[in-house]
Image (tube, rainbow, N blue to C red):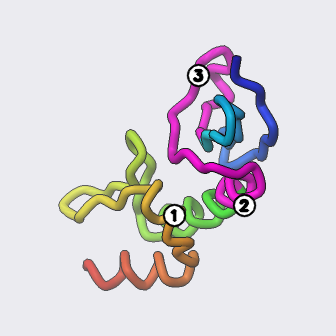
Amino acid sequence: MMTIRHSIACDGSDVLVRETGLRSFEVSIQARINPLGKGNVLETFAGLEEAVAAAEHFCKLHAAAKEQGYHLEEGYFVKVDKPKHHVGRLLQERKSPDDLAALLLAQI
């Protein structure tokens, strides 16, 4: 059974932390227009605190990516004719929003 342990509103969606088993917490994003859906898993973490911090951090990264014209698609920040960036890796690396913006700008 999956238990929602944390939820945060993020740009028209909900970012959820679900406990999926012993020491396993999924960070996922779910559109508010489809509240019965499972959502898209962004990354899995071993600890609740780490997963909650990642969920909160994702919203900041998402805002930085949107400012550069990127959107979220199947776990990646994507933009036409630009390299895509895996959200899970960005969360694991704890990439700052400023560092992400600089990375995306460097690819112009």
Q: Secondary structure at mark 1?
A: helix
- Between label 3 and label 1, give the one nearer the viewer: 1
Q: Is residue 99 above or below residue 61?
A: below
Q: Secondary structure at mark 3?
A: loop
Q: Report the span colored magenta.
A: 28-55
The mark that comes first in sequence, 3 or 2, is 3
- Assess whether mark 1 and mark 3 are in contact (beta carbons under 8 angstroms): no
Q: In the image, what residue occupies the spot 78% across and 41% down?
A: 7
Q: Which residue matches tag 2?
A: 53
Q: Is residue 62 magenta?
A: no
Tell me if residue 14 can be seen: no
Tell me if residue 35 can be seen: yes
Q: Which residue matches tag 3?
A: 38
Q: Is residue 82 above or below residue 17?
A: below
From the viewer's perspective, tell me whether residue 37 is left or right of residue 99: right
Q: CA distance from mark 1 to mark 2?
A: 11 Å
Q: Is residue 94 above or below residue 1?
A: below
- Amino acid bearing label 3: Lys
The mark that comes first in sequence, 3 or 1, is 3
Tell me the quadrant of the picture where the N terminus can be found.
top right
Mark drawn on residue 36: none
Q: In the image, what residue occupies the spot 68% across and 34% down?
A: 22
Q: In the image, what residue occupies the spot 60% across and 50% down?
A: 45
- Amino acid bearing label 1: Gln
Q: Which residue matches tag 1?
A: 92
Residue 84 position within the rendered picture, expressed as x and y whole percent measured from the top left: 29, 59
From the viewer's perspective, tell me whether residue 12 is left or right of residue 73: right
The mark that comes first in sequence, 1 or 2, is 2
Q: Is residue 46 magenta?
A: yes
Q: In the image, what residue occupies the spot 45% across and 56% down?
A: 87
